[in-house]
Image (cartoon, rainbow, N blue to C red):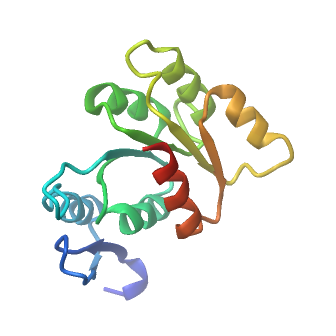
Amino acid sequence: MSLASRKVCAFSAHGSGRRTFVLDQADVECQKRVLLHPSASPAGMTKKKILIVEDVEFNRDLLVQLLGDDFHLSLAADGKEGLEKAALDQPDLILMDLGLPVIDGWEATRRLKASQELRHIPIIAITSHAMSGDERKAFAAGCDDYLAKPIHEDELMAKIRKLI
């Protein structure tokens, strides 16, 4: 098996200060290993929950690597699944790609903000839609913040910390 056909996921025991990168062909199984580690912070407080709604597997994996140590994560690959998981998981924050299949991120955001039960959840648009006016359109759809790809870790973390 060639190395180029494998996915990269990250796992670390919280508080260990080390991150182990797991090369795995089975993306779902790799994500389970990353997501199933204990979800408590060193102080014993429950981690905040973030729902990542992103259709590109590589981008989902990258966000899991960046956020997996500090937050409890759930994943959705399209807008419809994102709406379902938001209702089920009641996350503290949603990272929403705007160019999604089934239901796009623009419409998923509008539906979330129209829902009495879900409108309080902050949404950060994370998108390659970086054309003039797209940021304004994202805010008009209901996003609470906007981040154009490529993602810069420090900027992402600052935006997340500002909202939760």
Question: Which quadrant would residue 19 be assigned to in this image?
Answer: bottom left
Q: Quadrant of residue 23?
A: bottom left
Please count the marks in the image: 0
26 with respect to 159 (left or right): left
Residue 33 left/right relative to 92 = left
Q: In what quadrant of the picture does the N terminus appear?
A: bottom left
Residue at horizontal 58 percent and vertical 33 percent from the top: 104
Residue 74 seen? yes
Percent from the top left, x then y, of residue 95? 49, 46
Residue 118 in percent (x, y) is at 41, 22
Camera sees residue 76: no
* Residue at image coords 31%, 55%: 71
Seen as rendered, the residue at the extreme front is 43
Q: Is residue 152 above or below residue 124?
A: below
Could you tell me which residue is drawn at 31 percent across and 30 percent down? 90
Closer to the camera, 104 or 15? 15
Q: Tell which of 158 and 116 is nearer to you.
A: 158
Residue 81 lies in quadrant: top left
- Residue 40 location (% of width, % of height): 16, 56
The quarter of the image holding the C terminus is top left
* The one of 39 and 103 positioned closer to us in this rendering: 39
* Residue 18 image offset from top left, x and y in percent: 25, 84
Residue sitting at x 44%, y 31%: 121
Up-down: is 81 above or below 95? above
